[in-house]
Image: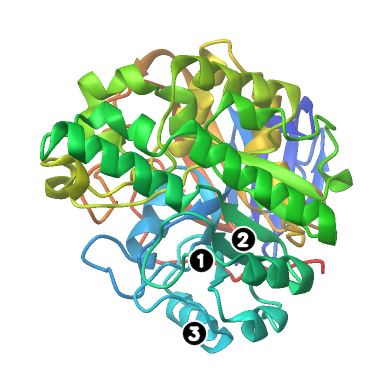
Amino acid sequence: MKSILITNATIINENKRKTGDIYIKNGRIEQISNNLSHLQADKVIDATNKYVIPGMIDDQVHFREPGLTDKADIRSESLAGVIGGTTTYMDMPNNKPPIITNEGLDKKFKIAENRSFANYSFYLGATNDNIEEIKNTSKRACGVKIFMGASTGNMLVDNLQSLENIFLHCPKLIATHCEDSPIIDRNFKAAKEKYGDNIPLEMHTEIRSRECCTKSSTLAINLARKYGSRLHVLHLTTKDEVDFFSNDNNVSNKLITAEVCIHHMLYSKKDYARKKGFIKCNPSIKEESDRLALIEGVKNNNIDVIATDHAPHLKSEKSGKYEDIPAGLPVIQHSLRACLEFYHNGIFSLEKIIEKICHNPALCYNVKERGFIREGYWADIVILDFLEEGEIDEMPMMHKCGWSAFSDVAFKTRILTTIVSGNIAYENNKIPDQPFGMELEFNI
């Protein structure tokens, strides 16, 4: 690890902005001060008129490895993330085979060694009958994922006693996908009877409905309250659900937290007309009133984290009959810039965005010594340039599936440099050839 000195930076961190220098040595932030130009460093970066932020921590991605590596893998997607300013990710367990044992979890960590460009951790997946694995969840895991709506293979947890046991015994954070499968099945059957093989895409909003989300998230929250569980509800989509969560700004005070994905704040049902199957996702995008309510939920701190649910599918799969189009959007190469468009458009402050994509994910998951620009912490840092006019990303698409849901956006942010664990992982449009990602450690 070479030493790095960043000078004259506008540092956005912990709800403050200040101009200063950052000295990085042995992978960590050794010193932050107004003038460190006297220090010797292997590399000096002049960040005059540039913004320096902690790297994005994405708590919900699907990198598809093992088992679906025609669509994505850990190397390709983590590389895309680093180019886009994501320095840490937490990957979901619905692989082939699903990661529902601690032995399988260890094998997945082994795959990531020396192949991940960003720092990483993985979820253990829940099933109706793997409670003994959950009781003994590895300390390496970022949490336990419960699919309370339809999912891959045997990962749908729809038995109430199984859910009770998980919420009672799980020693880690529980992350939930909250949709009610019987409601989805009923709605799909009704749509099929009405439309046959020509179900309109916008019916996805009605099939994966408001009711199916609120019923499931209500159940998860009630179970967490009953057993005192640490619950994190992923990808909220409805106005109704926002009000289920406390607006205490101190995430450390909360046992129950919530996340929203970028695309649910960007798109609503009306956008199917132009984006078609490329925005089909689960849970579904909802009405315009829901989209606006999610934005207000971020502002008011009912929603604690912004993430992606990065879910690659081949472009050829995203058209055709409604029921044949898989749900999910690949976005991680552009996710940080997409978040920052909310700043450029006057919707969120820069400080609020950094709180939701850097600080709060670290606090929610008790990530050790990351997520902040602090002396002694690992140096996961992104240097940004803000532009007067938006520009289309000219970097090659690193998503293995070959496309991004946001590639048509003219971003007003340019990613200049990404530092991962104290190493220059990306700089000035040069694709890195060496991965520096490290396995995450947790405080508890």
Position in image of residue 205 (x %, y %) = 37, 30
Task: Name the residue nearer the viewer: 112 or 98.
Answer: 98
Inspect this view and state whether residue 74 appears. yes
Whichever of labels 1 and 2 marks the residue nearer the N terminus, that label is 2
Q: Is residue 342 positioned above or below 278 on the image?
A: above
SS at circle 3: helix
How many residues crowd mark 1 within 10 Å: few (<14), some (14–19), many (20+)? many
Position in image of residue 144 (x %, y %) = 62, 67
Whichever of labels 1 and 3 marks the residue nearer the N terminus, that label is 3
Residue found at x 52% / y 52%: 60
- The answer to whether the residues at label 1 and label 2 have Cβ atoms under 8 Å apart is yes
Residue found at x 67% / y 41%: 258
Q: Residue furthest right?
A: 253
Task: Name the residue nearer the viewer: 82 or 35.
Answer: 82
Question: What residue is pinned by disc 1?
Answer: 436
SS at circle 2: loop
Question: What residue is pinned by disc 3?
Answer: 104
Task: Name the residue nearer the viewer: 422 or 443.
Answer: 443
Position in image of residue 315 (x %, y %) = 16, 46
For the residues labelled 1 and 3, the Cα–Cα distance comes to: 23 Å
Question: What residue is pinned by disc 2?
Answer: 421
Residue found at x 50% / y 32%: 210
The amino acid pointed to by label 1 is: Phe
Q: Is residue 31 positioned above or below 227 on the image?
A: above
Query: Viewed as shown, does residue 262 lie left or right of 328?
Result: right
The amino acid pointed to by label 2 is: Ser
Task: Name the residue nearer the viewer: 96 or 9.
Answer: 96
Q: Nearer the viewer, mark 1 or mark 3?
A: 3
